[in-house]
Amino acid sequence: MAGLTRTAGAFAVTPHKISVCILLQLYAPSAQMSLPFPFSSISQHNRLGLYLLSLTKSCDDIFEPKLEDLINQLREVGEDMDAWLTDHLTNRFSSLTSPDDLLNFFNDMRGILGSLDSGAAQDDQIILDPNSNLGMFVRRCILAFNLLSFEGVCHLFTSIEVYCREAHSSSAQYDESNDNLESLIQHDQMDMEKYIMDKATEEIELQKNASGRVPFHLHTPEALFKVTEGLLVTRKEKSRTNTKKAEATQLACASSSTVDDTLVDESLFLRTNYQIQGFLMEQADAIETHGSSLSSSSIESFLQKLQNLAPELHRVHFLRYLNKLHSDDYFAALENLLRYFDYSAGTEGFDLVLPSTGCSMYGRYEIALLCLGMMHFRFGHPNLALEVLTEAVRVSQQHSNDTCLAYTLAAMSNLLSEMGIASTTSVLGSSYSPVTSTASLLSVQQRVYILLKESLRRADTLKLRRLVASNHLAMAKFELMHVQRPLLSFGPKASVRHKTCPVSVCKEIRLGAHLLSDFSAESSTMTIDGSLSSVWLKDLQKPWGQPVFSQESGSRKSSTFFQFCDHLVSIPGSVSQIIGASYLLRATSWELYGSAPMARINTLVYATLFGDSSSSSDAELAYLKLIQHLALYKGYKDAFAALKIAEEKFLTVSKSKILLLKLQLLHEHALHRGNLKLAQRMCNELGGLASTTMGVDMELKVEASLREARTLLAAKQYSQAANVAHSLFCTCHKFNLQIEKASVLLLLAEIHKKSGNAVLGLPYALASISFCQSFNLDLLKASATLTLAELWLGLGSNHAKRALDLLHGAFPMILGHGGLELRARAYVFEANCYLSDPSFSVSTDFDTVLDSLRQASEELQALEYHELAAEAFYLMAMVYDKVGQLEEREEAATLFKKHITALENPQDEEPKNMA
Amino acid sequence: MVSKESCRNEIRAAIRQLSDRCLYSAAKWAGEQLVGIEQDPSNFTPSNTRFQRGSSSIRRRFSTISTPQPSAGFSQPPATPLPQEEDEVIDGDLYLLAKSYFDCREYRRASHVLRDQMSNKSLFLRCYALYLAGEKRKEEEMIELEGPLGKSDAINRELVSLERELSALKRTGAIDSFGLYLYGVVLKEKGNESLARASLVESVNSYPWNWSAWSELQSLCTSIEILNSLNLNSHWMKEFFLGSAYQELRMHGESLAKYEYLQGIFSFSNYIQAQTAKAQYSLREFDQVEIMFEDLLRNDPYRVEDMDLYSNVLYAKEACAALSFLAHKVFLTDKYRPESCCIVGNYYSLKGQHEKAVMYFRRALKLNKKYLSAWTLMGHEYVEMKNTSAAVDAYRRAVDVNPCDYRAWYGLGQAYEMMGMPFYALHYFRKSIFFLPNDSRLWIAMAKCYQSEQLHMLEEAIKCYKRAVNCGDTEGIALNQLAKLHQKLGRNEEAAFYFEKDLERMDAEGLEGPNMFEALVFLATHLKTNKKFDEAEVYCTRLLDYSGPEKEKAKSLLRGIRMAQTDFPSMDMEHFPL
């Protein structure tokens, strides 16, 4: 706690700042001269000025360049007088032989400043306006030096020695290369008037540049940055990469090695609080974005260093918690989380988020509870998490911290919706909070809804844009998955519409994304802490021209994206994460509604635009979706190739879903190829992933038993398959998983169809269709319709007409959005229908049948779906036989044989992609 | 058993050698032990009796219990021969000068004087002076460079060169045991613990009388495994070492046994007495500890070490006057010792002046940032002042200084419980119980947490209370609570069992009070509903001895019993007509 109160924004004199001061002295010597001594032209002089300006602006950066880097930069800037500049710099440093010299140096510095009432200065004198950027810098340096105690001066003196010693070895080699001092001396006198005008316009320009920014001038303005960079490029060749540029890129990758390198100098210059906080924030972002692919030990080591340097900086513990969280170290994460909150009472780092709620003497332990709850959630202890979050609700109510309450409620609803908790009465019932206690009578889903609503309401009144946005997204997710009906309805049931409404889902998603367009209000308070003085967030305060998502209309035009791309740089990570999440959610909703292209486009948008800023788990999800899409629409070969790439990228992510996807794909593949043993094995592995404990989410559990039933079905063990499916249905019912119910019903219909019990299958198929209708699951409905038609046909060939009608009704959906398998099935079935229709004559209409069969066989070959392919070829051969095309018949027959043999001995071609 | 005379001779020589090398604290320690050895009655001179305390009656009372028979010791190990001092005529003059500089705390000057001297003794003194100079500068820098976020990275700048020189010497074998000691210290400072341990072990094996080396070694033994893995020659100094190491590892019984053994030789050692008191304090034998400290102070009235422990005892016994006397005395002796500040803090705390107490604890911590008990005590003060977040901060610092400090963990739990976060607090209680599983108070605190209305996890509370009962709950909360909880959950049988047990306890301790009435009423009603009228009557009649509403209740119960009793025989008659 003490850390924050003590000289928060200190500005310390460092050797680097002294070198800038020396250069400033050169730039504006106090002597009366139109053009100071070494400069040969005004442009040269201006060039140095611009360079100095950029240096002063970046001097609040956490990493200060070494003398060597500075000399190299000077060499670029100074053109032919570089040797003179560097010599002067090093000589000036070597002339500082005692602390007294430092004192004199800063006294001299005072001379280059003009008096405050500017205008009194003579025309031919170059003086720094004390209110200009450079003048301000000099004044700050002088002030900071004057505040130093004698010991402080001594320490500065020793650090200067080290600073020079480091550079000494490297600078020696350059000395002989450009030794043309003489030529420099012959500088031509320039027209004075012109110079002064130049000077004036320059000053105005600079002022203009500066005025739009924060008063602190902490960011290197983009324009200026470019100017300096342009200067540098004009030099023959860039011997070294510009350090600034390196810094800029380094933020993006935040590679641990650079962190390590630069932290070595840290021992020399202990930064101000703001700088370190900003740095830590950046590291926290990096941990989240890169997940555990970032080596946790390297982060640990620099945290250790930082802690040694600044034991009162408690954020280190929080960062360590994040790091441990991402490397799945439960005990260390818990320990560090608790330690952080014990030390800082939750007021360090978080305090600037909520300036309105004055920090009470009680501290902010409710935030600790919130974090702890989320940690338990992540580590798979939902009950514990719920308990902690309930306490968080209580404590934040007690301390009337509405912000925290809103976040807690959101976290709680997230927890409840993701974990299959059948009954929470035992937990929530005991709580005293009005929010949760009213909910004790309701089902989990209803409670989620209430929590979300509450959270949304609070967030709205508190203007927490991010939370509002993510709540909207959660709401969209909820509406997507659950039947919307009035809570606690006592009226007649007839009035209740059992439907999810795509319009409202869409509205929520849009609301979520749109709200973020004016995020600046919240984000500025959020990031003030630290980022102010750090270069990497330099664009944060950029005036936000127009909202990104200005178009309300449904069709998103590509122009939005480009516009968006332009601004992407300036959006804080968390905001772009939420926007990205909205795209992912859109993709998911389209997936469910059954529009493959829309789903794909949204995922692609996410992967291309938000890939950099997204958290690793979100990025992984996008990849998963794309791979799934590939498998469905392009066959397994491409999917496996893509999977390999994704695996390399994401396998280190904790709670990785890649493994799950791999098992799914392998299982699917094995089923299609008729390799039941392999399928069974995959199924068992899936079951292993989905253990019966509470921590595993329902999605996975449902998936595992769904696949088990399908494997059993493929093995023709109908009764067992039906049993599994039944119990799965019961589970889905218990946990209120409506969408899954629809697909389980469809599976049951399939089972009955395959077992030849078409009459039994019919009600299931119909039920599935009605479920699909109420949830707007168009694609699933189409496939259910197909099954229904198949069942009708199974009842006898006299129903062929009706089956065909049904099929044709579903055809547009199937062909437009269905995957390979579904389409092939539809085609084969169509042929079957025609063939079994007694009113259909093969000899006259054989083209219709052959067309669909050909289509089907192509798609099935891509899928390697041997069973159905064999059937298609068989039918084809029969048709060819009927119409007397013997050659084609033979061809179809051989293909038929090939697929049949492949189906019968699946072992001899083990998939090469097996891990 | 080592003979007292040989011990005495060894120590005498060692003190000379140690103070020759300016290892003053080790010399001081050795000196204390020297006069702690019981004198032979043969050369008993009046001047020696000053240090003998056989006359103390209290002392006799305790020493008779504990002193083992001297003959029952282990067989005499091969004695480590005392190293003979090398002849130092040549560099003797310079050495004398350097030593006087050293004594005047002019360390750099001392090391400069010895820059070209090659003898072992000069070498050691030069390195040692250099090390101390570096330490001094480090502490100054620490204050000079203190940034807004705490201390800077001030380091002892001599360490690197010292390590280089000493490791070179070690390689060539030209290093004596004192050099090894210094090498160990340097290595420890540089964070190379295993090497440091090895070097220190080598040092104490060749020269066991350097207590500083032993204590450095002890601070490196953070677990019993490490301690057992050390390859130490047996020597009576090793017993001292083991005693203090066991104490640090919370093995108080073993440590007490060691000290009892050592008392056979060093029967008048203040050090051993203080250490024994420390161990007894950890075993919560406050009365005994108080007597020991009184005795200690009588013999060594200007002692400041360990007096904070004494003040804790006085605090626990709420002896205001004695505590103020102690504080006054210690303050006159040395005001700027962390112990003195801590004692004053305790005094103010007992007086209820918590702000002042915090001020003195702060001062103690300023003097020694790693002073564990001051952090914890300051946490207690903040709790009293209802400044929970400050309390939490203080406790957490204590825990980070020593993660085994169960008091601080307990304090953390308490603070969070105060803030209405019982679930969060549970984690801390669990931690504290982990380090002290046999303390009923901790179990009761945890049970209360579970029982709180926010959590209402009664089953877990019952489990905790059961553990508390098993640990020998002295305050009698657990049994009563167990009974009540069972009653609340409708398990009357269990409730009756625990009420009965509680009643037994209260009878044994001769206590009376509302708990007793409650137990009696419950038992009477319970037995009555279970038709055990005779036993119910016994409890009812016991209740009749007291006045108040319970008496009325008992009367009505008795009436009911009579009624039931008269009813029943008639029913029996119907069933079994004679």
Image (cartoon, coloured by chain):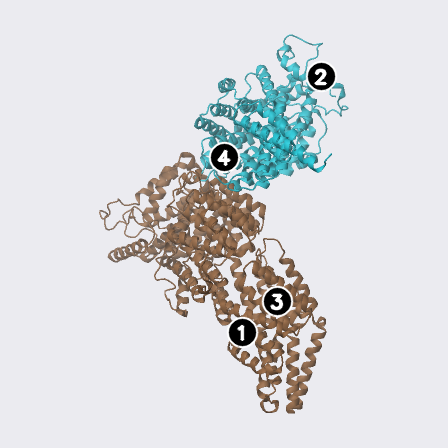
Q: Look at discs 2 and 3 and give the one toward the viewer.
A: 3
Colour assigned to chain B in the rendering is: cyan
Q: In which quarter of the image is residue A545?
A: bottom left
Determine whether the residue tagged by mark 1 lies in a helix, strand or loop: helix
Tell me the kind of residue under disc 2: Glu
Which quarter of the rendering shows the N terminus of chain A? top left
Name the mark on residue A665: 3
Assess disc 2: are there few (<14), some (14-19) or many (≥20) residues with their C-alpha within 10 Å of its C-alpha.
Answer: some
| Residue under label 1 | A782
Which numbered disc, 2 or 4, marks the residue that appears first in the sequence? Answer: 2
Tell me the kind of residue under disc 4: Ala
Q: Which chain carries label 2?
A: B
- Mark 1–mark 2 Cα distance, whole angstroms, equals 104 Å
Q: Position of residue A202 (x, y in %)?
A: 29, 56
Is residue B405 in view?
no
Tell me the kind of residue under disc 1: Ala
Residue B373 to residue B1: above or below? below
